[in-house]
Amino acid sequence: MVIFVTVLFGTAVFILIRLGQAKYSSPLITRNILIKTNNKGTKLQYYNKVLINFIAVYTAKLPLGRYRLLIGRRLIFLRSEKMYSPDEFLSYKILMSVTGSLVYLGLFNTFDISGLAAVILLFRFPEYELRKKKEKYERDILKELPFALDLVIVCVEAGLTFDAAVAKYIYGGKKTSLRNEFEQYLKSMGMGENREKGLKALSERVNLRDFTSLIYTVLQSEKLGTGIAGSLRLKNSDLRVSRKQRAEKMAIQTPVKLMLPLVVFILPVIFIVILGPVVLRIITDLK
């Protein structure tokens, strides 16, 4: 009976969700909802930036020279040196920790070890956020690189130079992380920078092993005078093999990652639903 009621309740919730989706499936309504959401996010980011800049005025006066250098190196590692200055990032961390301490005091009217742990975690949260952005950036680069190379190889085999093939790739689709990096490289070429230095600077910005290997393959092909299309095709096959291996590794890790939520959240609920009525019946009979 309990299982039947649970299934019936879940089915009813699913039907209500689908009806709600059907009701708001109009493209006009969906677009308006997205615009409002983006505007709210933009306003929130603006106010957050204003607060960070206000606090940065005071943190810049603190004698934290070595710590600023450490934060600067950390921002370069996290690819966020253009997003925050060291003082702004320190202000962001202070803003998170102070806000968390005020919320904790408001909720519990005290400040103990748990509150201190929460403040420390919130002080570390901005680095965690930037690390996640960096990981997403690297995933986007590695995901698109083989398909970008396919287009570049076709253009090179058709008689275009490597830079012209990259330009064809840039202006042939939507903006992505890889396209932005190649676009920055072409802009540096347009400003008269040396081609080898530009490619090495591109490799240093992306800072991924597969991408660095690709750039040095292009440079070596030019120095030795070999066909760049053949070298790129061989490199592209290696990239696809690496991508397949990463996917297999993630597939192998999936059962291990599912073990914790399965044991902590799913199995106890199943045991309660199945064994709960039996235990209640036994307790009632014993009384």
Image (cartoon, rainbow, N blue to C red):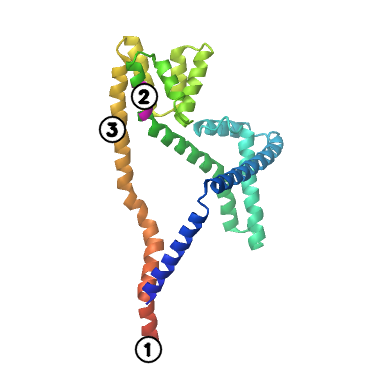
Q: Which of 171 and 217 is in front in this view?
A: 171
Query: Residue 90 or 236: which is nearer the viewer?
Result: 236
What's the amino acid at mark 1? Answer: Leu
Disc 1: which residue:
286
Magenta stretch: residue 149 in it? yes
Q: Is residue 3 left or right of residue 17?
A: left
Look at the numbered discs 1 and 2 and tell me whether their residues touch, using CB distance below 8 Å: no
What residue would you read off at disc 2? 151
- Above or below 15: residue 196: above
Residue 200 vs 85, above or below: the answer is above
First reached walking from the N terminus: tag 3 or tag 2: 2
Image quadrant containing the C terminus:
bottom left
Which residue type carries mark 3? Answer: Val
- Residue 186 or residue 280, whichever sits in front: 186
Seen as rendered, the residue at the extreme bottom is 287
Q: How far apart are marks 3 and 1 (CA)?
A: 64 Å
Pointer 3: what residue?
241
Mark 1–mark 2 distance (CA, rounded to whole Å): 75 Å
Of the two numbered discs 3 and 1 in the rendering, the one whose residue sits closer to the viewer: 3
Q: What residue appears at the point 39 percent right and 85 percent down from the top-left corner?
A: 283
